[in-house]
């Protein structure tokens, strides 16, 4: 399980699983078809349930004795979720999410990229991140 999966798990977001394939049709007598059989319809898309991430994070921030601002800081976001926020952990997360190499050498730039990317990925996986935080 990757570092980002831990974030999703802490927020109660599960990766959508593909719908199971439909059961095979009942066996019928072997009669050659007069016309070619139509391919089966594709399975319906899997809907990702929306998780109220904002309410969760605001609640955690209100209950935390530290003044943490998850909206602007990747360190604070990770601390709220009780996930390792050390530089080495953030670097591991940045590598996992594909941070450009030129940002990896500057911790401030890496952190800014990482914060935006984590919020975008949370939103992509069903979290309700406000649009202004995704720009």
Image (spheres, rainbow, N blue to C red):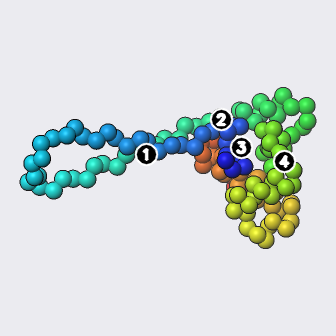
Mark 2 highlights which residue? 12
Residue placed at 9% from the left, 48% from the top? 31
Disc 2 is placed on an element classified as loop
Residue 18 percent location from the top left of the image: 47, 45
The number of numbered badges drawn on the structure is 4
Label 1, residues with CA under 10 Å away: few <14, some 14-19, many ≥20: few
The mark lying in front, picked from 3 and 1, is 3
Which residue is painted at 51% across and 43% down in the image? 17
- Height in image: 9 above or below 109? above
Q: Which residue is mark 1?
A: 45
Callout 4: SS: loop
Instruction: Give the mark nearest the N terminus, 3 or 1.
Output: 3
Indicate which disc, 3 or 2, sits on the residue closer to the N terminus: 3
Bin the neighbour count of mark 3 within 10 Å (Cα to Cα): few under 14, some 14-19, many 20 and up.
some
- Residue positioned 69% across, 62% down in the render: 98
Q: CA distance from mark 1 to mark 2?
A: 21 Å
132 w.r.t. 65: above or below = below
How far apart are labels 3 and 4 at the CA level?
A: 12 Å
Q: Are marks 3 and 4 in contact (CB under 8 Å)?
A: no
Q: Residue 24 is drawn in which quadrant?
A: top left
**Alpha carbon of mark 4 to alpha carbon of mark 2: how far?**
19 Å
- Label 4 Cα crowd, 10 Å radius (few <14 / some 14-19 / many 20+): some
């Amino acid at each position: 399980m990757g570092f980002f999966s831990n974030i999703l798990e802490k927020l109660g977001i599960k990766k959508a699983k593909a719908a199971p394939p439909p059961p095979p049709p009942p066996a019928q007598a072997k009669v050659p078809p007069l016309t070619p059989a139509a391919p089966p319809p594709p399975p319906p898309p899997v809907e990702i349930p929306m998780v109220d991430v904002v309410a969760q994070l605001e609640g955690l921030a209100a209950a935390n004795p530290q003044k943490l601002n998850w909206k602007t800081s990747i360190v604070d976001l990770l601390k709220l979720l009780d996930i390792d926020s050390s530089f080495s952990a953030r670097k591991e997360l940045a590598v996992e999410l594909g941070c450009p190499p030129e940002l990896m050498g500057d911790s401030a730039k890496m952190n800014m990229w990482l914060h935006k990317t984590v919020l975008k990925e949370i939103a992509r996986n069903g979290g309700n991140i406000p649009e202004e935080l995704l720009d």
